[in-house]
Image (tube, grey):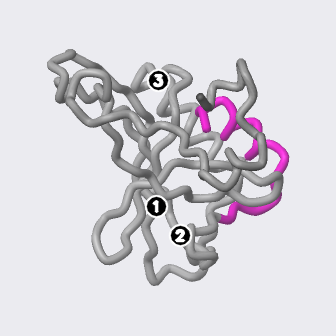
Amino acid sequence: MKLSEVKNALSTLETIAFELPNGEWVPNHFHVTEIGKITKKFIDCGGKLREEEVINFQLWNAEDYDHRLHPEKLIHIIELSEKKLLLDDCEIEVEYQGQTIQKYALDFDGTNFLLITKQTDCLAKDNCGIPIEKSKVKRFDLQKGSCTPGSGCC
C-alpha cells in the first residue's frame, strides 16, 4: 500500500485499527512513534546493485489509555513528514513489537488496516543456480488424454 492510499483511506475513517496477520488487533491506544524514509542499497546474489525505498511507520503501545490517535491527526503527521522528509509516494512498511521488532506490509479492507507478513525472496533467480519450478502433470491426467498438442504438457 502506498502513502497516498493510506491518506485516502484515513480520510474515510472515524477511528484507526490495525489487524495483525493472526487476527489479533493492535491495541487501540497505540501511537505512531515515527514515520521515516528508509533507503536500502544492496547487491543481490546475482551481483546486481539494487536500491529500495519504503516509508516506515512504527507502531508502539504505551500505557496511555486516554489518548487515541485519530485519522485526522495521523494525516497531519503524514503531511508534516512528507514536507520535512521529502517523501515520495512509496510503499508503506510497518514496524510493530512482537517477540522482536516485526516488519509488515500494509493493506486496507475498507474499514481496517491489515498488517501483512513479509517474506524474503531471491531477487536473482535467473543467476543464483536455483532451478525454476516447472508445473507438474500427474501421470493419471496424461492417461485421461489431458495432454493435447499445443497444451505445453508434452
In the rendered structure, which amino acid carries the disc numbered 1? Answer: Leu
Give the label on residue 87, or none: 3
**Relative to the observer, which residue lies in front, 11 or 64?**
11
Instruction: Give the numbered dot on residue 30.
Output: 2
Q: Earlier in the sequence, mark 3 or mark 2?
A: 2
Q: CA distance from mark 1 to mark 2?
A: 6 Å
Q: Residue at x 34, y 47 (%)?
A: 120
Identity of the amino acid at label 2?
Phe
Q: Is residue 26 above or below residue 76?
A: below
112 vs 127: above or below: below
Task: List x then y, in percent, for residue 141.
Answer: 70, 50
| 146 left or right, relative to 87 | right
Does 111 sit left or right of 35 as displayed? right
Residue 129 x %, y %? 21, 31
Q: Residue at x 51, y 48 (%)?
A: 105
Q: Residue 103's x, y, as percent?
A: 39, 55
The answer to whether residue 15 is magenta is: yes
- For the residue carrying disc 1, how many other residues have a C-alpha within 10 Å: few (<14), some (14-19), or many (20+)? some
Looking at the rendered structure, the secondary structure element under dot 1 is strand
Labels 1 and 2 touching (C-beta < 8 A): yes
Q: Is residue 106 above or below residue 59?
A: above
Q: Which mark is residue 73?
A: none
Q: Earlier in the sequence, mark 3 or mark 1?
A: 1
Magenta residues?
1-17
Residue at which label 1 appears: 59
Q: Residue at x 77, y 48 (%)?
A: 144
Q: Quadrant of residue 55?
A: top left
- SS for callout 3: loop
Q: Amino acid at mark 3?
A: Leu
